[in-house]
Amino acid sequence: MLPNIVLIGFMGCGKSSVGRRLASLTGHRLVDSDDLVAQSEGRTISDIFAMVGEPGFRKIEENVLAGLVGVVGIVLATGGGAVLGEANRAVLKKIGTVAWLDADPDVLFERATRSNRRPLLQTEDPRGTFDRLLASRRPIYEGTADFRMDSTGLAHDTVAQTLLDRTMRLRAHAG
Ligand code: S3P
């Protein structure tokens, strides 16, 4: 059976959009960790940040991710900071093949700030915040992922198909 596919990457890299297409290509169910967090609290991500801050959000996120270990037949789109906790990184690797969806920083920034639903970028200097966060996280994405896929300039459908091919190849090589 096709393994679960876990999408990690910075805000704006297209995890949800690519995840949706991957789900329809594979027949897997798309699970979006931000949606699960919001559902579990009955609030938006922005409201959760406003009420319990980032540490509170991270705790809920950690619980949600831990609850997915053992679930089969899913494409998991994670929040951009899901890789920050060491426990989470181990959990994501247990859940499935981990793909890092990356793109040119300007592309990421434009997509990430298209809406104002990303509390971490609601600062006086969004680009400065973005650059600092991206620089600190890149090595973490790299260290967590089974492979990296640069989606700059590619249609979501192409990214999804390539991701699927690479996942299958990886699996074939793993025996
Ligand atoms: C976050 C990314 C968001 C969401 C929350 C925190 C982050 O998800 O989980 O706002 O720390 O990068 P997306 O990557 O889907 O925007």
Image (tube, helix red, strand yellow):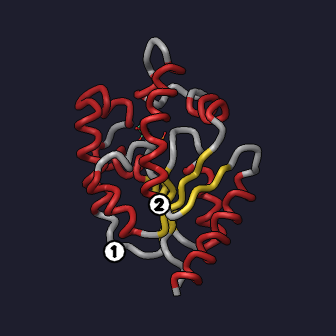
Distance of mark 1 from mark 2, alpha carbons? 13 Å
- Which residue lies at the image location 64% right of the left edge and 64% below the top edge? 163
Q: As drawn, which residue projects farthest toward the bottom?
A: 175
- Which residue lies at the image location 38% right of the left edge and 36% below the top edge? 44
Quadrant hosting residue 87 = bottom left
Q: Secondary structure at mark 2?
A: strand
Q: Tell me: 81 left or right of 165.
A: left
Q: Quadrant location of ligand 1? A: top left
Residue labelled with disc 1: 70
- Above or below, comparing residue 11 to residue 25 in the picture: above
Position of residue 77 measured from the top left corner of the image (x, y, whole percent): 49, 55
Instruction: Say which of 43 and 167 sits in front.
Output: 167
Q: Secondary structure at mark 1?
A: loop
Quadrant hosting residue 112 = top right
Query: Is tag 1's residue or tag 2's residue first in the polypeptide sequence?
Result: 1
Residue 76, label in figure:
2
Residue 113, label in figure:
none
Position of residue 85 measured from the top left corner of the image (x, y, whole percent): 29, 49
Does mark 2's beta carbon lie closer than 8 Å to ligand 1? Answer: no
- Which residue lies at the image location 45% right of the left edge and 12% below the top edge? 124
Position of residue 86 measured from the top left corner of the image (x, y, whole percent): 28, 53
Q: Residues within 10 Å of mark 2 (few under 14, many from 20)?
A: many
Instruction: Say which of 12 and 72 sits in front.
Output: 12
Instruction: Say which of 51 and 163 sits in front.
Output: 163
- Above or below, comparing residue 79 to residue 46 in the picture: below
Position of residue 103 measured from the top left corner of the image (x, y, whole percent): 64, 43
Disc 2 marks which amino acid?
Leu
Q: Report the number of numbered marks.
A: 2
Disc 1 marks which amino acid?
Gly
Q: Residues within 10 Å of mark 1 (few under 14, many from 20)?
A: few
- Which residue lies at the image location 61% right of the left edge and 77% below the top edge? 168
